[in-house]
Every structure is written in C-alpha cells, then in structure tokens.
Image (cartoon, grey):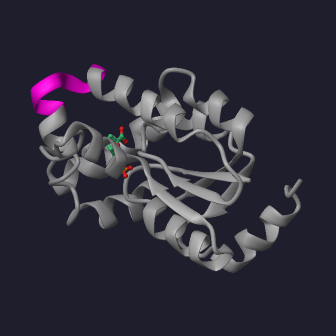
C-alpha cells in the first residue's frame, strides 16, 4: 500500500509521514526533497528561477515517477493535491490522509518557518492567518477528497496505522 500524506503547509506532513513509515517499517519519500534533489535547487530558488508553473509540472512528474509500491509513505507538498489531477491520481494509486489543522494553529506554526516557503515568505505574522484561511477555502475541495482525515494536532500516528489496516489488500 502507498500512503500519501496531504495537508496545508506547516501541518506536519513530513514528521507524521516519517513516524508512520518507521512504525510500519515502510519506506518514506518527501516529495519536496525529491524535487529539490532532481532540480539541484531549493524550492525557493526554483520558484524564483523558473516560476510556480514549472514547479507544479515538476511536482506532478515526480509524484508519478514515485509510482505506487507496497509499504511506502509519501509526504506531499501543501499544494500537491490541487494541480494536474494529482488528487485523483493519488486516490487511484493509494490511500490519501489529510492532516487537518485550523488556520490559527497553522499560522502559529508557520510564523517561524515561512522563509523556506515562497508562497508565504513575504507575509507578516498578522497577515498569515487570513492568507491561510483563504487558501484553505480554495484548497478544501481537493483536501476533502482524502480517504482518511486525521487531526494534525491531537491525532495519534498509532491509531492512524491501525485505521490503515482496514484498507490493506
Ligand atoms: C507549497 C507547499 C510547500 C512546497 C511549496 C508550495 C504549497 O510544501 O511544496 O513551497 O503550495 O502549499 P510544504 O507543505 O511541505 O511546506
């Protein structure tokens, strides 16, 4: 089974994905890191040099390059589900898990971690929460297609691992 972890920037996708993979003894891939390696560039540089459209194309290509395999957890970027039919692709090839978190919690987590994220790097702390609320509203239709919804603050990875057993072939 391939598990795709999705959710807004700052919701803890990589941390949760790594924990889940280690609990299950599965492989872990971080999609943003894969893009950075492939392009030999940080995400910030990539946005600056080639623009968001190029980034989204590379993101979709890398997602498909990973393919699906037994025992794999993929942590996606926050925007991954919203472009190039990626959400349908993931739902057709594995189990999607949406890490849900409120705009307030996301804003506080992101205030220290915005510099490596080109979409929010220029925002002040006071603009952050309203930007997140609006972006979440736009992205909701994709995120809501996830097979499993998981509370990003209170959820236990152990219980997520249990829930996933219902989907085992
Ligand atoms: C993005 C989220 C980032 C990264 C890029 C764009 C987004 O990943 O893919 O900066 O559109 O929400 P994280 O969610 O891991 O920060």
The foreground one among 125 and 154 is 154
Residue depicted at x 24% and y 39%: 119
Q: Is residue 57 left or right of residue 69?
A: left
Point 38% across, 51% down: residue: 9
Asked if residue 84 lies left or right of residue 39, the reply is right
Left or right, 17 with reference to 165: left
Write the residue at 89% across / 53% down: 169
Residue 102 appears in the figure? no
**Main secondary structure found in the magenta portion:** helix
Q: Quadrant of ligand 1?
A: top left
Instruction: Tell me residue 116's x, y (percent).
Output: 18, 53
Q: Please give the name of the residue rendered at 60% of the width and 71% of the height, measured from the top-left corner.
A: 20
Q: Is residue 84 above or below residue 29?
A: above
Foreground residue among 33 and 115: 33
Question: Relative to residue 78, is residue 1 depicted above or below?
Answer: below
The image quadrant of residue 168 is: bottom right
Residue 101 forms part of the magenta stretch: no
The answer to whether 45 appears left or right of 6 in the picture is: left
Residue 31, position in %: x, y?
Answer: 42, 47
Any part of residue 29 in sight = yes
Q: Is residue 164 above or below residue 70?
A: below
Residue 63's place in the image compared with 98, above or below, is above
Where does the magenta region start and end?
Answer: 47-53
Count the marks: how many? 0
Q: Residue 79: x, y in percent? A: 42, 37
């Amino acid at each position: 089974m391939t598990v795709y972890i999705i959710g807004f920037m700052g919701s803890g996708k990589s941390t949760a994905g790594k924990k889940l993979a280690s609990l299950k003894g599965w492989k872990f891939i971080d999609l943003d890191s894969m893009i950075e390696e492939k392009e030999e560039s940080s995400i910030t540089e990539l946005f600056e040099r080639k623009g968001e459209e190029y980034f989204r194309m590379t993101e979709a290509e890398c997602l498909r390059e990973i393919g699906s395999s037994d025992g794999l957890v993929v942590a996606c970027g926050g925007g991954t589900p919203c472009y190039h039919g990626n959400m349908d692709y993931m739902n057709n090839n594995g189990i999607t898990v949406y890490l849900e978190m409120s705009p307030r919690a996301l804003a506080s987590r992101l205030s220290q971690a915005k510099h490596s994220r080109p979409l929010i790097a220029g925002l002040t702390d006071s603009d952050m929460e309203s930007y997140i609320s609006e972006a979440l509203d736009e992205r909701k239709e994709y995120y809501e297609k996830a097979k499993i919804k998981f509370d990003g603050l209170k959820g236990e990875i152990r219980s997520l691992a249990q829930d996933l057993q219902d989907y085992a072939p």
